[in-house]
Amino acid sequence: MRLVSGPGRDEAIEGKVVDFSSVLDRTVSGGVQSTVVGSHAEFPLPSPINDAAISVHCWAWPTVPERSAPQAIWSIGDVALVIISGGLTLRMGSATLAVLPDAIIAKHWYSILTTIGDGEVCIDLRRLDAKVGAQRTLRAATGATANAATLLLAAAGIGRSGSPLEPYNGKINSPTLYLAKPSAEMIAAWHAGRLPRSRHGQHGNSAGTSRRRRLSRTLEANRGTLSTASSAV
């Protein structure tokens, strides 16, 4: 074995080679070590959601949305918001609930509000730095509701090895979850790139129910689990 170093500073303009041949003059036992690939976050909810209407908002900055492989921005139970070939797709299991085609461009911030329940799904998308055609909204009739005890970010699920399924490439900022559609004022603030505040200066919907406020705070107050490519903290 040889250690090859590159050029150094000042007079050390040439690299050098150090011989370590004696290091490998022995036999060592080998083994197989598995590692987790991909980063994701898992947030437990204060109480399970059972056949409920929900709204999920986050800001997202995808790096490679043009890829054909699905990339889940978030998932809650069987419901997942996924980027596929530049389009934004809301799925429930293997069924597609709504598709917003040609919606995402790489390395731009998007405000994404998704509402599920009351007989329909809605994707409300706004690119924060766009001047023309910045906002797109899609509604579709469905009887789908949410059932889950956790919210996953950057994954559609967790595989047997601990790696995220359909991992997302990019950034996710300030995810919030509600048991009803947020107010028009909150949506306007999100689409303007601001965090909405109540009259008391706390994030959340001041006009909402206490249960809705508790649920939205889960993502801000609960530690949850953040899993990187090699560890969980």
Image: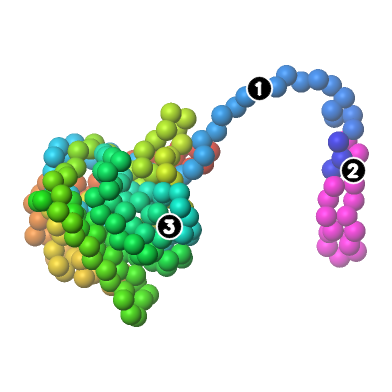
Image coordinates of residue 100 in percent, x first then y, are: 30, 61
Residue 158 left/right relative to 179: right
* Residue at the image point whose x is 24% and y is 36% from the top: 149
Q: Dot 1, how many residues are within 10 Å of its Cα: few (below 14), some (14-19), or many (20+)?
A: few
Q: Which residue is mark 1?
A: 31
Query: Which of the image's four quarters has the N terminus?
Result: top right
* Residue at the image point whose x is 30% and y is 68% from the top: 126
Residue 142 seen: yes
Of 101 and 216, which appears nearest the observer? 101
**In the rendered structure, which disc, 2 or 3, sits on the residue that comes first in sequence?**
2
Image coordinates of residue 187 in percent, x first then y, are: 20, 66
Q: Secondary structure at mark 1?
A: loop
The kind of residue tagged 1 is Gly
Q: Which residue is mark 3?
A: 85
Q: Which residue is mark 2?
A: 18
Of 14 and 53, which appears nearest the observer? 53
User: Which quadrant holds residue 205?
Assistant: bottom left
Q: Nearer the viewer, mark 1 or mark 2?
A: 1
Q: Secondary structure at mark 2?
A: strand
**In the rendered structure, which disc, 3 or 1, sits on the residue that comes first in sequence?**
1
Label 3, label 1: how far apart the Cα atoms are: 39 Å
Q: Is residue 7 magenta?
A: yes
Q: Nearer the viewer, mark 3 or mark 1?
A: 3
Residue 143 left/right relative to 155: left
Image coordinates of residue 203 in percent, x first then y, are: 22, 59
Residue 203 seen: no
Residue range of the region highlighted in magenta in the rendering: 4-20
